Amino acid sequence: MGRITTAIHSIFTATGVTARGAKMNRHKICRKVAFPLLAGLLSGAVAATLKGFQTYIDDENWIEENLFFDSGAYGSFGTCMSFMMVFRTAQSYSRYWEGIDMVYQIMGHWFNAASNTLAFSRCSTAKAEEIENLRRLCVRLFSLLNCLLLRELEGEEVRAESGLKFPVLDPGGIDLQTRAHLLNMKSHSRPEQVFQAISKVIVEAQAFGIIASPAPIVGRIHQEMGLGMTKLQSAMKLAYVDFPAPYNLGMKAMLVVHMMLTPVAVIAWAKTVLFSGFFSFVLVFIMFGLMQLTAELDNPFHDSGFGFDKDLVQQKFNKALVTILLEERRPVAHLASSADLIGATDLEFMKARMEKSVYERNSYGSMVSVVPGQVLEE
């Protein structure tokens, strides 16, 4: 069974059904494909029935006289609907990548803030235990902040510590009172609460001398956190504001009309019952499937059938936090005694080559500007 699962996964990866950074839920995909499939089957059944009636029963050509219409009108309608569908898909595709880009940018700001917090405490004269406690607390809080950010963008509430869903670096290491307050069932805006908790920790550490850098330098931490929170609010619009409803309503109305017209248009040029049902099914299924696809791309944070792997994002962020925490315990890098590999003579030679290269470029540019039509010989 394991080999079969591995083979199926390899086939999906090779064909592009799954990709790096993406997550696929087969059960949800099946439910979402059900409606386009049902619409296609209904249209195909109607087309096959009409063609069968025309071929075997309609001796007086009633269908041809009453249902057939100019194929040019159907083509014009299909062109208009295709244009609207292409625009809708392009906008949804743009929203999808914009949302993912914002998540990674926010994660970068959180990492910069955490890295600066740990680095600015290195030259502190406070007790080593206090410095280590600050570092471990900040790492846990930033991990919790990123987790709650992803849950907030998903539109789901965190009801308890067990409902975090994404891995957090030892949430039990945070004091019970703070943890109960941040994960309170009646609490809202949890990312903002954790953001404020981190700001209070940094301000208090600076006041007690645990962060020894000057205040303007420490302000860099708050600046990075502020940029991350600003981009979080921008990402909220993709999570909570859907594509304009009037456009979606118009597209759905056109799809219904398309589903009713397609069987009549197909039987006008299809020769057999089988081909009438097949082509009607394909045309309707593709259009309804594209509409469902755009709905999937509208909100990149929603836990739907296809989406980017938020577990992977959280794991990468946790790994980065653990890395800088371990790096702070290592001694500061210094120059080795055998590092004099580039002597003064080598530096002078490199400088001369650079100056010669700049001189040759300037000379070539001046010659071209003076004699633009002349071909330079090597």
Image (tube, rainbow, N blue to C red):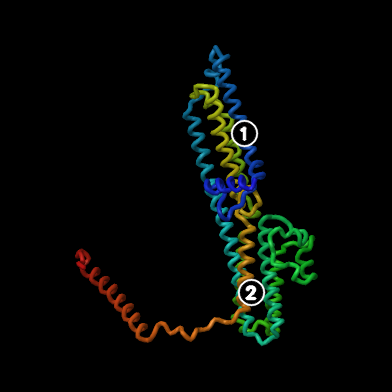
Residue drawn at x 58%, y 57% is 100
Q: Quadrant of the C terminus?
A: bottom left
Residue drawn at x 67%, y 76% is 135
Q: In this view, does 305 lie to the left or right of 366?
A: right
Asked whether 136 or 120 is in front, the reply is 136
User: Residue 59 at what x, y percent from top left?
Assistant: 55, 12
User: Looking at the rendered structure, which numbered label has been put on residue 325?
Assistant: 2
Residue drawn at x 63%, y 77% is 118
User: Residue 130 at what x, y percent from top left?
Assistant: 71, 81
**Which mark sits nearer the N-terminus, 1 or 2?**
1
Q: What is the secondary structure assignment of the residue under circle 1?
A: helix
Amino acid at the residue labelled 2: Leu
User: Looking at the rendered structure, which numbered label has been put on residue 85?
Assistant: none
Asked whether 155 or 141 is in front, the reply is 141
Asked whether 50 or 15 is in front, the reply is 15
Residue drawn at x 71%, y 58% is 165
Which residue is label 1 attached to?
39
User: Residue 72 at what x, y percent from top left?
Assistant: 47, 29
